[in-house]
Amino acid sequence: MSDSVILHVSDLNKRFGRREVLSGIELALQAGECILLSGANGAGKTTLLRILAGLEKPDNSQITVAADSPRSWRRCRKELHQRVLYLHQQPYMFDGSVRYNLGYALPTGLKRPIRNRMIDAALDWAGLHYLHDTPAKSLSGGERQRVSLARAWLRDPKILLLDEPTANLDQEARERTLDLLKSFKEQGISLLLASHDPLHFSSLIDRHLHLYEGRLVMIEDSKLMSIAATQADGSLRSTA
Amino acid sequence: MESLGDTTLAALNLLLSGNPELWEIIAISFRVSGVAILVATPPALLAAFLLTYKRFPGRRLLISLNSTFLSVPAVVIGLTFFILLSRQGPLGEWKLLFTQTAMVLGQIALAFPILVAMGHSALQASDVRAWETARTLGANPARALLTIMREARFGLMAALLAAFGRIIAEVGASMMLGGNILHYTRNIPTAIALESSKGEFAQGIALGLVLLTLAFSLNTLLQHIQGKGHPAT
């Protein structure tokens, strides 16, 4: 295994009843790499992300975090919680202001002035200063997405898992989200994002993996470009 | 026999004149029920959390059993603890029968299933993403647990108030386990039962007014808290 691999998963399986959702998944994530994960609805994208975030138990798997030796999911769950951050498709906002929500990502023992400075920096980073005292539950979808990314930024994870981060967002919100994701990548944070829209993330992604019948399939750049071209073609035709 | 109006006036007079015996009974009631609710709440909420968030064999059976205990009359709880705490009982050596501690035990047993059932409903109604978001943002299980309690606080507060209202007004367990001893285990409901049986309605009505005022205050408080949680739009 290469030194730059920060998360390696092998032989990962997951069943829901009699249905095998993930079968023998093998995945290596490099430091600072961005992988796009596509697949049909119900293909298991969310399940895979949740397993990698330590939120859902696989039936079996071997996981290597950083340069450690391979261990079962249960044994490295704590480490996954420490290093990996998962963002729901519709991010959850705690009852309280945007500032409260951002502060949640910081260590509890932090002194108030330092805490406030860090929260201000996160508000600046995500362009959210005008919302700092707004109740987070009243935010729009795009604003929620930015607050959740700012929370992640404060938490400073090694790996960020995103479940359809731009679904149901308007064009402007999608562009802003993309800019923030690029900023994460520039900081060397690895991204694994599930999306139906590879074209939108083409400037960000290094690899494109497709989940098909429980297995991961690598999609070559040329194939990605052809998908992008087909999509662009389709949208041109539909607007014509 | 005096009219209801005269008796109520006499009751108000007793309350407002600061009758020491009456206020001592009220203080005992609040002390016993307050301790019972304080002791019962943490384990009950933990149980509610486990029933909501953890999947384990027998979980559904436990939920059904807890719901069954909701409908057990207070006097049956009193009888059970009476047998346990009486001299010949397995816990007779503790010499707790006819003490405030025995009353607290009985009231814990009454409050616990209410707290678990209503706490379970409140947590079930809250969003599971709250727990997951807390965990993925680095909160340890204890902090994540406090977070979801905070998120579900309005429902949990309702559970607390309902349980407190139930135990401070129950007569069966308090009578059997406390023995209705003046200055020691006589609380509001046992005093009402005693005074009514003697035909002394003024004190009974005065204590009844206290319970009514308490019920009204708890409900007003609950409405206020819930109003804060869900502002009209």
Image (cartoon, grey):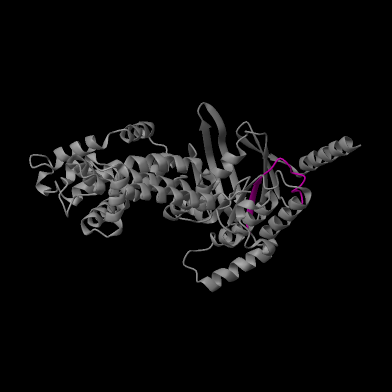
**Residue A191: image x %, image y %?**
64, 52
Instruction: Name, please, the residue furthest toward the right.
Output: A240
Quadrant position of the C terminus of chain A in the picture: top right
User: In front: B116, or A47?
Assistant: B116
In reply to whether residue A193 is colored magenta, the answer given is yes
**Residue A114: image x %, image y %?**
55, 72
Instruction: Name, please, the residue furthest toward the top.
Output: A18
**Residue A161: image x %, image y %?**
61, 49
Give the residue displayed 69% in from the left and 63% down from the top: A130
Does residue B54 appear in the picture of this structure? no
Give the residue displayed 61% in from the left and 51% down from the top: A137
User: In front: A141, or A192?
Assistant: A141
Predominant secondary structure in magenta?
loop
Answer with left or right where residue B97 lies relative to residue A194: left
Does residue B25 appear in the picture of this structure? yes
Task: Give the magenta-colored segment's residue range.
Answer: A189-203
Q: Count the marks: how many? A: 0
Give the residue displayed 11% in from the left and 41% down from the top: B86
User: In front: B163, or B201?
Assistant: B201
Answer with left or right where residue A125 lies relative to residue B231: right
Answer with left or right where residue A41 lies relative to residue B224: right
Instruction: Name, please, the residue furthest toward the bottom.
Output: A113
In the image, is residue B149 above or below residue A226? below
In reply to whether residue B9 is colored magenta, the answer given is no
Give the residue displayed 32% in from the left and 45% down from the top: B5
**Residue A70: image x %, image y %?**
48, 48
Instruction: Name, please, the residue furthest toward the left.
Output: B88
